[in-house]
Amino acid sequence: MDPVIITPDDVAEAVRRAPNWKSPGLDGLHHYWLKGFVVCHAMLARQFQEALDQKSLLSLFTTGITHLVPKDRDSTYPSKYRPITCLTTIYKTLTSILSAKITHHLNSNQVMSHAQNGCRVGGRGTKKPLFIDTVIGKVIKRNRRNLSAVWIDYKKAFDSVPHTLLKRVV
């Protein structure tokens, strides 16, 4: 991939796509305000570019506010809480720009397989395979047929089995 160059237009597009009132991090800044302060886009683009060139982010970018949200009513144990971290609006803007640039590179160079739907912009991740499984199950049941199926948990499989074996099996 060619080196990434961040322009004020990239910042403007990332800010335009962002929801207005999502919970901000330590900066307390909502995207609503960044959308209105257009003069800040050039400065943000310059600072983002400097961070990329230096290969380092200030802690302001990566420090968030973590809220513990109870998983259920029994909230007496720490394991019954789910940590949710709200990152800064500026960091969300930077990652949105980088994501758009990477997606453009992948699409223009046809790097990613169409089967990799979970990572694709607008993809439905696991919903499509689950829908297909449901339809197949109903057809099998209606026609009173037998079905043999296998599901592979790739995350666990890639942690515990040699990749060459998985590639050969799949």
Image (cartoon, rainbow, N blue to C red):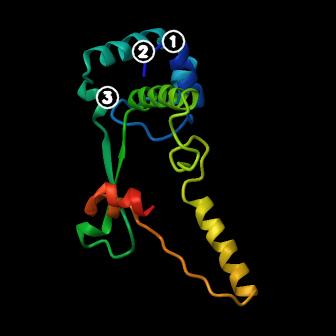
Task: Tell me which numbered mark, 3 or 2, is placed earlier along the sequence.
Answer: 2
Q: Amino acid at mark 3?
A: Phe
Q: Do the residues bearing badges 1 and 2 touch, measured as CB atoms within 8 Å?
A: yes
Task: Name the secondary structure under disc 1.
Answer: helix
* x then y, percent, for residue 162: 27, 58
Which residue is depicted at the point 47% across and 70% down? 151
Q: Which residue is mark 1?
A: 8
Q: Amino acid at mark 2?
A: Leu
Depth check, mark 3 against mark 1: the one in front is: 1
Q: Which residue is mark 3?
A: 61
* Residue 4 drawn at (x, y percent): 42, 17
Which sits earlier in the primary sequence, circle 3 or circle 1? 1
Q: Residue at x 31, y 64 (%)?
A: 81
- Label whose residue precedes the other's in the sequence (1 or 2): 1
- Using the numbered discs, state the Cα–Cα distance from disc 1 to disc 2 in whole angstroms: 8 Å
Q: Quadrant of residue 64?
A: top left
Residue hosting label 2 = 44
Q: From the image, which quarter does the C terminus lie in?
A: bottom left
